[in-house]
């Protein structure tokens, strides 16, 4: 082969790597953003990236588009490794026609998505795009449709992670919404169906992009995104950290991470963490930090629905999904958002063979018109459904309150919970003493005219109720709790339970798919 041909290849590669050209690269940097290739360099192990379709160009001739044809056409795609594990990646290149979606660009993305599913490796999309390429009209929309369909078919088969590293507008937002985790960069990324201009025309509202769909909005108010980070570098690190807890596909288990933290480590402080006053809060993060390996916990959706905590940790090297009520927010009650948040997480863990560790301190479902009118019934049922259908090992520890429907929902024995422990401080009952006495004895108590006598009688009834139901022994008598454990031993007991459940196999009845209460 002539040197000329080799030189041509080298030159063409060099040109392709320039994307939309130096000027547009500088403009991208001036906005505080990295280019698609710089992002991929940070994401993948050094030298591991193999790019596909570097020479693909669009075929559009509308509006003079035949004169602006760049190699690669607005997205950099390929494969590489993260911590030695294969992943497929598509990073939109804003320097080429604003990263807008063309027919050929969609084809490139679909190619790597198909490869990822075929070989069973995670798919990572780094979004930075002006949306549908206007000049391509319906062909651009069709491209989105092709991607969405692949997102759907890949869901539960391979992990899919979306980084929003710039604009993500219009129907384009549905690809991240269909993936498992979405990371947004504060101040430089946003997601919305229609931008501020259209909002102004349609509703008369005046909003900025940030107010409409910035990282804070989607991680605090809507729950659409899972992480808001300060920089692109931090966003990339978050993607890598997430992957370390996941298997590459639904037929594998997550990597085992060696730990120096002894499985038998006890923590005496847990024996004193539950306050004497049942209405006083304590911090569930302290319990989680105490029982997981090295106190390391990767929390998901930290700023949204804070009354429930979800996230990944390791226990004696095994990856686990932790779901825990947080008594410090809304007393840990389950509301619409908490139910939705935890349900999706439970389903992710179940799809990818990640055992569930559930820590319960729940006074019930949040009541009131706002919740009822918002559909707490069907939203609460999502979490009930998610725990009930999950077949991964499920270990539950009830720390304090576990009342009524919320008791059932939080991975109880009857929802195929495998090992259900309780601390001696647990109250497992239909409701707390206050409410129960009110329902059962209101007539009797109202008949007592002297207020002091009435209080005395009420306290007596409450004490009687507490003695009978507000403890873990009543549930343990029926075998609904497998053992009552000392809080200080929780780490050791949960680890032993998980080890025992390693070989768990549970079949559910055949079905085309389920019909969970969406
Ligand atoms: C074609 C586009 C484009 C688009 C940007 N560009 N968006 N070209 N189709 N959708 C081009 C610009 O012409 C420009 O080309 C380059 O990309 C960079 O754009 P700028 O406007 O210079 O950048 P910036 O000032 O940073 O603004 C970025 C932006 C803005 C906010 C994203 O470009 C914008 O508002 N674009 C339109 C967004 C939009 O309405 N998209 C359609 C949404 S509806 P040159 O040649 O100058 O570099 C949708 C439906 C999807 O997407 C449905 C899926 C089911």
Image (cartoon, grey):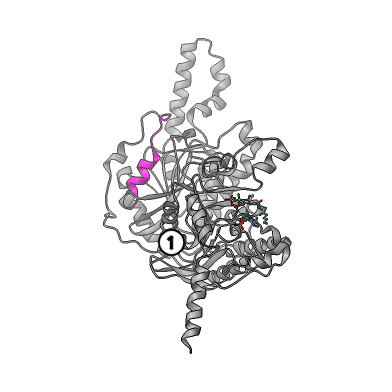
What residue does disc 1 label?
A: 43
Look at the image and tell me whether residue 140 can be seen.
yes
Task: Provide the secondary structure element on which disc 1 rests.
Answer: helix
Q: Residue furthest bottom?
A: 1
Task: Say which of 64 and 231 sits in front.
Answer: 64
Locate residue 149, reporting x and y percent: 64, 63
In the displayed structure, 318 sits above or below 358; it is below
Q: Report whether 337 appears left or right of 512.
A: left
In the displayed structure, 435 sits above or below 5; it is above
Q: Quadrant of residue 38 in the image?
A: bottom left
Task: Say which of 37 and 268 sits in front.
Answer: 37
Task: Say which of 401 and 458 sits in front.
Answer: 401
Q: Quadrant of residue 277 in the image?
A: top left
How many marks on residues?
A: 1
In the displayed structure, 113 sits above or below 233; it is below
Locate residue 476, reporting x and y percent: 42, 45
Look at the image and tell me whether residue 161 can be seen.
no
Is 391 included in the stretch rendered in magenta?
A: no
**Disc 1, ligand 1: is the CB inside 8 Å?**
no
Q: Report whether 28 appears left or right of 135.
A: left
Locate residue 14, reporting x and y percent: 48, 71
Task: Say which of 85 and 211 sits in front.
Answer: 211
- Give the magenta-colored segment's residue range: 278-293
Locate residue 513, reporting x and y percent: 64, 61
Q: Residue at x 34, y 59 (%)?
A: 317
Query: Which quadrant does ligand 1 occupy?
Result: bottom right
Counting other residues with Cα less than 10 Å from the Cα at mark 1, is it few (<14), some (14-19), or many (20 or more)? Answer: many
Q: Residue furthest top?
A: 450
């Amino acid at each position: 082969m002539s040197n000329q041909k080799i030189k041509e290849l080298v030159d063409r590669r060099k040109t392709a790597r320039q994307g939309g050209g130096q000027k547009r690269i500088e403009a991208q940097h001036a906005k505080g953003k990295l280019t698609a290739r710089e992002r991929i360099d940070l994401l993948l192990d050094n030298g591991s990236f193999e790019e596909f379709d570097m020479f693909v160009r669009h075929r559009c001739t509308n509006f003079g588009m035949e004169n602006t044809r760049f190699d690669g056409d607005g997205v950099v795609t390929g494969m590489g490794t993260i911590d030695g594990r294969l992943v497929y990646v598509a990073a939109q290149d804003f320097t080429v026609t604003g990263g807008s979606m063309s027919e050929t660009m969609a084809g490139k993305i679909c190619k790597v998505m198909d490869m990822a599913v075929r070989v069973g490796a995670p798919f990572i999309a780094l979004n930075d795009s002006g949306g549908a390429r206007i000049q391509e009209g319906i062909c651009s929309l069709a491209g989105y449709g092709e991607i969405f369909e692949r997102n759907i078919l890949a869901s539960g088969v391979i992990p899919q992670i979306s980084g929003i590293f710039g604009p993500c507008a219009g129907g384009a937002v549905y690809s991240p919404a269909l993936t498992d985790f979405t990371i947004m960069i504060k101040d430089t990324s946003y997601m919305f169906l229609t931008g501020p201009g259209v909002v102004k025309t349609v509703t008369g509202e005046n909003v900025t992009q940030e107010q409409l769909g910035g990282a804070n909005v989607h991680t605090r108010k809507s729950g659409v995104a899972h992480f808001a980070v300060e920089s692109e570098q931090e966003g990339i690190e978050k993607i890598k950290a997430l992957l370390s807890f996941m298997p590459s596909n639904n037929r594998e288990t997550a990597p085992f991470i060696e730990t120096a933290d002894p499985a038998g480590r006890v923590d005496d402080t847990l024996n004193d963490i539950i306050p004497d006053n049942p209405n006083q809060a304590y911090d569930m993060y302290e319990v989680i930090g105490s029982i997981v390996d090295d106190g390391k916990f990767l929390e998901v959706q930290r700023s949204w629905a804070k009354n429930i905590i979800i996230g990944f940790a390791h226990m004696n090297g095994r990856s686990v999904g932790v779901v825990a009520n947080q008594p410090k927010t809304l007393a840990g009650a389950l509301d619409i958002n908490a139910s939705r948040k935890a349900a999706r997480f439970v389903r992710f863990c179940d799809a990818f063979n990640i055992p569930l560790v559930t820590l319960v301190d729940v006074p019930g479902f949040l009541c009131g018109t706002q919740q009822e009118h918002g559909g707490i019934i069907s939203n609460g049922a999502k979490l009930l459904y998610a725990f009930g259908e999950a077949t991964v090992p499920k270990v539950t520890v009830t720390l304090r309150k576990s009342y009524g429907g919320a008791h059932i929902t939080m991975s109880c024995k009857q929802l195929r919970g495998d090992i259900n422990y309780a601390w001696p401080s647990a109250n497992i009952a239909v409701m707390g003493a206050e409410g129960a006495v009110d329902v059962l004895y209101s007539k009797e108590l109202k008949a007592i005219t002297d207020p002091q006598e009435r209080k005395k009688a009420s306290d007596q009834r409450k004490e009687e109720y507490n003695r009978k139901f507000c403890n873990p022994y009543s549930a343990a008598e029926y075998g609904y709790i497998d053992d009552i454990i000392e809080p200080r031993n929780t780490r050791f007991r949960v680890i032993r339970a998980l080890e025992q459940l390693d070989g768990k196999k549970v079949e559910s009845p055949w079905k085309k798919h389920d019909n969970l209460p969406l």
